[in-house]
Amino acid sequence: MRACDSAMRLISTAGGRYTRRAFLAVAAQAAAAAQTVAPARNQAYPSEAKRYSDPATEFTVVRLTDPTSSSFLTAPYNRGISRNFMLFSSDRGGDLNVYRLELKGGAIQRITDATQLNPQTVALIQGDRSCCYVDGARLRVTSLGSLRDRDVYTAEGSRITACAVTADGLNALVVERAERTSRIRLVNLTRGTASTFAESEDEITMPLPRPGGGVAYKSGASMCWCDRSGNERLLQLAPGRIASAYWSTDGASLLYLNIPEKQGELNSIREFVLATGQDKLVSKTTQFVQFAMNADGTVFAGASGSRASPHVLILVRSVRRELTVCEHRAKDPGALALAFSPNSQRVVFQSDQHGKPALYSVMVDRFVEETES
C-alpha cells in the first residue's frame, strides 16, 4: 500500500492528469510491492523441473525445485512420497511451509500456513489423504483435499523436536524436550489423547515406530527399544555412530547405517534382530553417510561422503553390489536426504549443489524391480 500511495502522489503532482510516466510508476511500484508479500496458502506454482545429463553417468536427473529458495525432504523415518505426489518443506514465502509437488507435471502447491514448521516432522498419513506436521508446540493434521487443519495435540512446558506416524495412520509418536528430560508421547490422531511412552535424561531422537507396535529410538548416542507395554531396554548394536535406521517390512529387525569409531574403517549397513539380539553385517559401503531402503528391503540408495566421488548409489542387497546413479555434490554430505518412491522406481534426494538445498529425482527402474505402490 505504501508503494501505491507514493505512486498516487506522483500522479497528483502531474496536475491530476494520468500521464504515461505516472502510470508506469504506479505499475512498477505496485509490482514491487506485490513481490514482498508472502505467497498465500493454496498458491500454485508452475513446474520448476530442469532436466540435465549427469556428468558421471550421463543418466537423466531432474531438479524438481528451484535452488533460489531452500527445499527440504522430511526425516528418513517419515513417509513423504506417494504414488503420484510428494510433500516437502520450503521457505519460498519467507516462513517454512509444506508444499505438494505432483510427480507427473511438476506443479507445486502450498498446503499449510505454519509459522514455526519443523520440516523433519512432515509425514503422509496412511491413505495419503492427509498429512501431519509440527508447528511450534502444536501437532497439526491437514487434509490434502480441503486444506483444512486440525490441532491434534499441544505440548505444554516443552518443545516438540521430532514426530513419526505409525504405519496404520492411527497414532503419532511425538518427542518432547524439556530442560532436563526427553519423552516420547503416543498421540491418537483422531481423538488427540496422549500418553507417555518412554522417557530419558538424554536427548531422544530418531523415533522409529515398529510395524505391529512398539518404538525404537536414539537416547543420546545409544539405540533403545520400548515395547507396547512400556518395557524399555538398550539395543546392543555395533560400536559406532548410527546415521539412519529403518525397520524391516515385517518389523523383525532394525537395519541401520553404522559409522565406525575407528578412522579408516568402512561405513556399513547392519541388521539387528529384535527377538534374538543378533547383530550382523548386511554390506559394507563406499562410505555412505545416509541411506534409504526400498519398499521390500531388497535395495538401498546411499549417498557417499567421499569428496572424490560425491555420488548417489544403489546397493543391491543380495549381491552386495553398488551401482553409481548420479552425482550429488552436496557441500555437506551429512545433510543429504534420500527417499524411494513407493514402487521403488525413483529415488529423490536433497542437495545444495546448485545453491540452496533443492530436490532432485532420478529413475532407477533399470536397476530395481518394481514393488507394489
Image: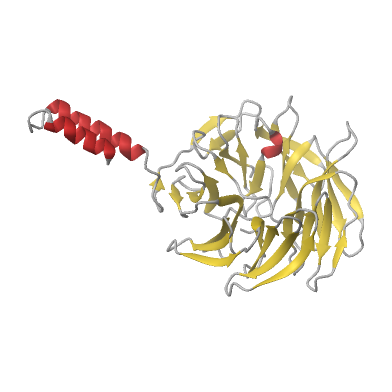
| Residue placed most toward the observer, 366 or 51 | 51
- Left or right position of 100 against 24: right
- Left or right position of 187 against 214: left
Chosen colour scheme: secondary structure
Q: Quadrant of the C terminus?
A: bottom right
Q: Residue at x 90, y 51 (%)?
A: 280
Residue 142, position in %: x, y? Answer: 50, 62
Against 182, is 337 above or below?
above
Asked if one can make out residue 312 in the rendered structure from this viewpoint, the answer is no
Against 86, is 11 above or below?
above
Corner quadrant of residue 212:
bottom right
Residue 275, position in %: x, y? Answer: 89, 65
Q: Residue at x 44, y 41 (%)?
A: 47
Residue 250, position in %: x, y? Answer: 77, 64
Against 249, is 264 above or below?
above
Against 106, is 202 above or below?
below
- Left or right position of 91 against 275: left
